[in-house]
Image (tube, rainbow, N blue to C red):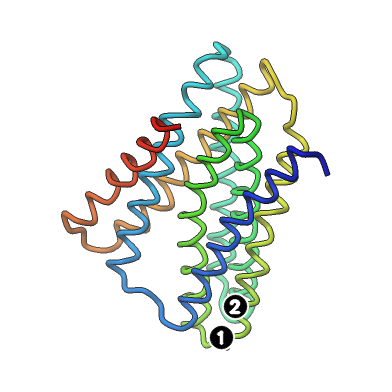
């Protein structure tokens, strides 16, 4: 394993641990809807800050309009396809429905891992900040999966093992992305960065905030989005 891949692997362990932690905590006591909405808003703000403060400036430097169009089209297309796949599986009932949910989440987690590889393709700084952003998102994902399985009556041991298994997809995705995307430049890099930006914006608008808005908002919950954005942006300014 190269030094670059070793670095990606070691840093990817952070969101992996966060996913498992969220699943373990939720298997004992699922957080309330208000708290979950607060965390979702905060995570959405953090992810948005990475896109606005790091990825978009890197994309602008490339001055490759064709790469932007191709990357954004691929990013939105892939995420829409994944969502349609997940919705079809979740409409199933019984054990097939649970298996479908797990398969859909595994695909989502694998894409998150690939996005980490995209971040490191743009530079170590971008990759590290993306790790921070996705750690919060995957923490919530672990909570969501554990809560869903708990409501269906699954034993705690199986819930925890399922979350652990899903978290490993992050490592697979990040190492795959880190291997395939190393050394990219020019149009290829522009396409990859645009794909990552589109996928992250989709995550913010169509997943995190959509689910968060299912709960009646309070001023504190709304402010959490901006707190997340400012927190990561301050980290960017200090590095």
Q: Where does the N terminus fall, quadrant-wise?
A: top right
The residue closer to the viewer here, 64 or 97, is 64
Check if mark 1's residue and mark 2's residue have beta carbons within 8 Å: yes
In the displayed structure, 28 sits above or below 12; it is below
The residue closer to the viewer here, 155 or 122, is 122
Q: Quadrant of residue 178?
A: top right
Give the x, y percent position of residue 99: 64, 72
**Circle 1: is it few (<14), some (14-19), or many (20+) Cα within 10 Å?**
some
Q: Is residue 103 left or right of residue 238?
A: right
Q: Which mark is residue 160?
A: 2
Q: Which mark is residue 156?
A: 1
Taking the spot 53% from the left edge, 37% from the top edge, the residue there is 76
Query: Element at badge 1?
Result: helix
Give the x, y percent position of residue 233: 37, 35
Give the x, y percent position of residue 127: 58, 38
Q: Quadrant of residue 17?
A: bottom right
Taking the spot 53% from the left edge, 60% from the top edge, the residue there is 87
């Amino acid at each position: 394993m190269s030094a670059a891949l070793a670095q990606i692997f070691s840093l990817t362990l952070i969101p992996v641990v966060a996913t498992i932690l969220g699943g373990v905590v939720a298997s004992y006591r699922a957080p309330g809807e208000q708290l979950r909405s607060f965390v979702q808003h905060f995570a959405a703000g953090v992810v948005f800050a990475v896109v606005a403060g790091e990825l978009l400036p890197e994309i602008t430097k490339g001055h490759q309009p064709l790469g932007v169009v191709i990357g954004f089209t691929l990013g939105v297309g892939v995420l829409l396809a994944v969502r349609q796949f997940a919705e079809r599986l979740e409409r199933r009932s019984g054990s097939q429905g649970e298996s479908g949910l797990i398969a859909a989440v595994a695909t989502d987690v694998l894409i998150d891992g690939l996005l980490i590889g995209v971040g490191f393709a743009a530079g170590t700084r971008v990759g590290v900040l993306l790790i921070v952003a996705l750690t919060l998102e995957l923490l919530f994902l672990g909570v969501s999966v554990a809560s869903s399985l708990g409501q269906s009556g699954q034993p705690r041991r199986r819930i925890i093992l399922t979350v652990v298994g899903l978290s490993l997809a992050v490592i697979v995705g990040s190492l795959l992305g880190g291997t395939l995307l190393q050394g990219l430049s020019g149009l290829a890099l522009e396409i990859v960065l645009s794909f990552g930006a589109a996928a992250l914006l989709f995550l913010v608008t169509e997943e995190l905030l959509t689910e968060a808005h299912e709960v009646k908002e309070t001023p504190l919950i709304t402010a959490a989005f901006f707190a997340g954005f400012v927190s990561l942006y301050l980290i960017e300014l200090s590095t």
